[in-house]
Image (cartoon, rainbow, N blue to C red):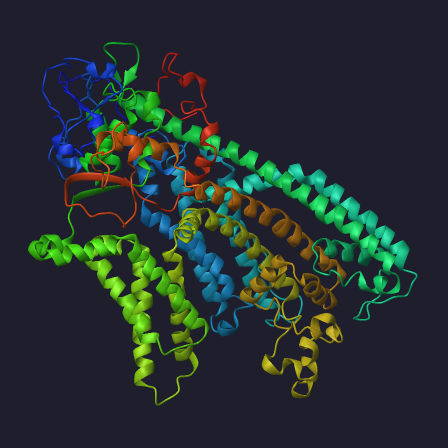
Amino acid sequence: MGDKLPTQDNKLVVEVEMNLKAIDSSSGNGATLSETPRIDFLNNSVPTSQSNSTASPSTSPSIEILPADSIDDVFGSSIVSDGGVYVDSETLKLAATLFEDAKSNRFIEFKHTVRSLGLYILYYKSIFKWLQYLAIFVILALATIEEPALALLKGVVPFWVCIIFELIAICYLGFRVLHLASFQTRKDFWGDKKNYVVIALIALSLIDIMCYVIWRSVAPESPNHFPHPIRWSRPLRPLFIINFPQARQIRRAFRNIRRTIVEIVFVLILFLFSVMIFALLALKLFYKKGWTFRTGDPYFQNYIDSLWSLYVLVTTANNPDVMMPAYDKNNFYALFFIIFLVVNLYVFMNVLLAVIFNGYKRHLKNEVQQAVFAKRRKLAMAFDLVKEKNKDKPGYHLSLTTWFKLMKMVKPKQSAEQVTMLFQVMDSDLDNRITKAEFLTSADLLNVPLTEVKDRMILWDKLFPKFFNNTGSKFIRIVVLHKFFRYFFDFAITVNAVFIALDITEAEWFFLALFTLEILLKLYVYGPVRFVSQLWNIFDVLVIGGAMIVTSVEAADKEQKLEGETLDFILVIRVLRLVKIVNGFDRFKIVVMTLKNIGPSIIIYGGVVFIFYYTFAIVGMEIFHTRIRYFGDQTYELDKLQPDEYFCGNAALNGSEFWMDRYCSNNFNDIAKAMVVLTELTVVNQWHVLTSGFVKVTHPVVKLYFLIFHLVVVVLIMNIFIAFILEAFLLEYSLSKSKFESQFEERILKLGYALGQKKLEVPGKTQAQKESILDDMEMEVLPEEGTRFHIRQSSKKVETLLQRMFENELDPEDIGLKDLDEEKPPRKYTLDSVVD
């Protein structure tokens, strides 16, 4: 167990007096932090007043930041609260760890001992996490070099090399499990199903390795002979991604998918029952007619084929081909297929989509709610470790002194100004202390992308002030900052697009010179720092610079015709210049920024799809490997092939639609080709033709493989993915701020610390009504001194985006445990206890 962390029962007769004076928030004069009242730290003194607790709405407290570059410079090693309670370093370390857990959405429980706390902090060190990711990547990447390997790597890597790499990776993952067990109680460790799964995966992988080595030593090495050595644990490898604590988002997605399946079972049964009824009707209508498809296959000659053809019709992949033989004989038969599509495609499939979306969103809300409660419980525990008792009313609070010391451990590089700003934003009742309810918002506020700007003066103004501020220079700055400067280059981009589309190259140098001039002017007016802070500017430099280089090479080598990759590169650079059109129109920028913000969420669901792809690809490789082969350009020229190479290397495909459509390259002979086939199946166009080819070379029962893939990936996963992306996109596209961003913005504007904020000119308007915190280059560059803040646009973490989706439905003070409510006696969190 290790030594228990010391409790906070030591007293030190030292108190901090905070004289917090109010400033008039309506002045809007852009006051800097250095102009606000000072914080005085005195020994053996008590607060002289609590005037700020009754401050009028027209005023707000302001705290001066002592001259310091970081939090380390503000306080010494002693940690003293307003109530005179000494907080030792180990207790503060535990509180800071709990706070960091809440901020980073880490919910692993650990024993509250000195030793366990150190092991827990070590567990989340970046080096160990990245080694874990590398180990999982190695395990998954082995599929590219194991038999059947990629074409370029076939026979290059001996099998024992793969075994060694896998053993090393598995051993490290085993070490991570033991590390996890070292700081958890047995109840917590064995109560977590993820640990059972990881341990089982490691054991199965080791058993599989031993079986494979033995099997390979006695069985033929050629995979064409059966039984050949099989790695039966390979389809289970993606489970390593899901079952480690760092994959919380993917694991959450799988949990919700599993719960959603239960709700759609009955709708799915009704849908399949409907297809079965129509398949029976089709069999009775057509099987005695003796008709055939255009490939010569019998038309609805047995119930299984009838059922399969109509299921494929629901995906529209074989429409209208499946109808044509009957329709050609009698036009009234079209009614059967139309009714079938209306009932099954437009009714049942849409009902299925609605049930999937509704159930998944409800489960997602519950998951987010539980995550928010877990985060708030961590914060509540941290608060209880460093709280001080109120002297003038019942309850507890957190002082500015303790807040600074806590931030010193959580965000050691964060400036004192920003730490104070966070304190002010949380202090909603203006009493210069943070209650538990206010502290519960601290982790979310700390995740707001707040940018701090000091001494906002560009480089040219510092180096050449006279030149930069002369009449000509000011005129250039006015021109570049004017909206018509942007409109002019928007027009130039459009004209350039027309020239590229018409393949007119005579004006190439003119547009290159024009866009280069634009880059230089922006660099001069905005300065190097602000210029490179915008990704669009970096993109412009790369594309225009690249176009300049390749055009120069092309002009210098005009005597020789450029061919191959060089010409392709030049054409790509020219076409990429058209992307500047996106930067020229505000609505395009909004769409791009929205996609950027939801990017992490797209990646998470992409990871879910990849896991299914990988599993199905490995299974498909074991079933269909070498059944269908591709022999290069001569594959479809029988006179150039050996007899055993005819028809994709399998005589069963002779005369098949698969062969006639030239699909031989669509096979499962390695992991890359398997992934391509699964992508084609996901798109569903011609998926029945692909399936028919693999059925002909194996057995009709393999239709189940393709049916299960379609139901799981296309019907379930892709519908959930699309629904989530639509929800996230609409949320971000509305440009509405989260409540935490709005809370930050309101307070920063009220205090006059906003970037580019100026004195109001319109009477009757409040600062908060008129100003906004900008994240745009196209505004006047003021040589402001002191500190300014603004909220920048950035990619949203998945947890942040999900919480924002449901933030209006979550009680801001609810932490999921009734005994933690302020109205009841506070729960005692002993430092050697484990969280319930």
Total number of numbered discs in the rendering: 0
Q: Quadrant of residue 473?
A: bottom left
Is 531 on the left-hand or right-hand side of 123? left
Drawn side of residue 384 relative to residue 291, left or right = left
Q: Image quadrant for the N terminus?
A: top left
State which quarter of the image contains the C terminus: top left
Relative side of 816 to 675, left or right: left
| 380 in relation to 272, above or below | above
Q: Residue 790: x, y in percent?
A: 27, 40
- Estimate the x, y position of residue 556 in percent, counting from the top left: 30, 84
Looking at the picture, does residue 529 appear above or below residue 648? above
* 677 and 24: which is toward the camera: 24
Instruction: Give percent across and percent down for residue 376.
Output: 39, 27
View extreme (left): residue: 466
Whether residue 320 can be seen here: yes
Report the residue that reaches farthest toward the bottom: 559
Please give the name of the residue rendered at 49% of the width and 74% of the height, measured from the top-left corner. Answer: 152
Across and down, in percent, residue 626 comes to: 63, 71
Q: Quadrant of residue 639?
A: bottom right
Above or below, 419 against 505 in this view is above
